[in-house]
Amino acid sequence: MGKKRHAQWADDNTLMSNINITPMVDVMLVLLIIFMVAAPMLTQGVNVDLPDANAPQLRQQVEPLVISIKKNGDLYIQNKQIDINQLAPRIEAMRKAKPKLPVFIRGDGKTPYEAVARVMSLLESAGIKQISLVTEPQ
């Protein structure tokens, strides 16, 4: 009888190893699509209707501290809601870690002026002298 050969062995008795990469490519493409869809949702922040203004665009190298004010008066630091009484102590703590941290206020266009003025007053009491107001270009 002849010698039996298995399909997985080459002529010189070494194992032939072939990797089928098609499933891996399929998984990677699905992950790529998921991240492409999810990425814009992660950077959106608090949804406010910004007022229009004709102002030059600022160029910042440092990620600013953004305080958002919704039209009902709710306050947010970055994406986290905060009580107005906690604003000054929280800002002071953040500024101790990063003294040159720029502060932006994103106020909804329909926010009462009183709410924006109160936030600006609290920021000034926390030692912040420069505040930028975020607007939409006209």
Image (cartoon, rainbow, N blue to C red):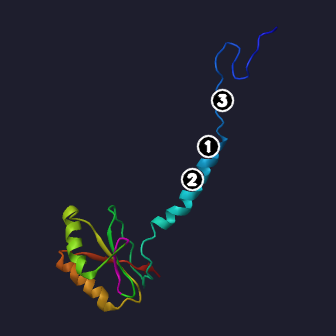
Distance from Cα at disc 1 to Cα at disc 2: 11 Å
User: Which numbered disc flags the more N-terminal residue, 1 or 3?
Assistant: 3
In this picture, residue 68 sits left or right of residue 98: right
Q: Residue drawn 39% across and 83% down?
A: 70
Characterize the local packing of mark 3: few (<14), some (14-19) or many (20 or more) Cα atoms within 10 angstroms. Answer: few
Placement of 76 over or under 100, stated as above or below: below
Distance from Cα at disc 1 to Cα at disc 3: 14 Å
SS under mark 3: loop
Residue type at mark 2 is: Leu
Q: Residue drawn 35% across and 86% down?
A: 73
Q: Residue drawn 24% across and 77% down?
A: 86
SS under mark 1: helix
Question: x%, y% of residue 57?
Answer: 39, 72
Q: Which residues are magenta?
A: 73-79
Closer to us: 60 or 14 = 14
SS under mark 2: helix
Residue 89 quadrant:
bottom left
Residue at the disc numbered 2: 31
Q: Mark on residue 24?
A: 1
Toward the top, the furthest residue is: 1
Indicate whether residue 69 is drawn in magenta: no
Question: x%, y% of residue 126?
Answer: 18, 76
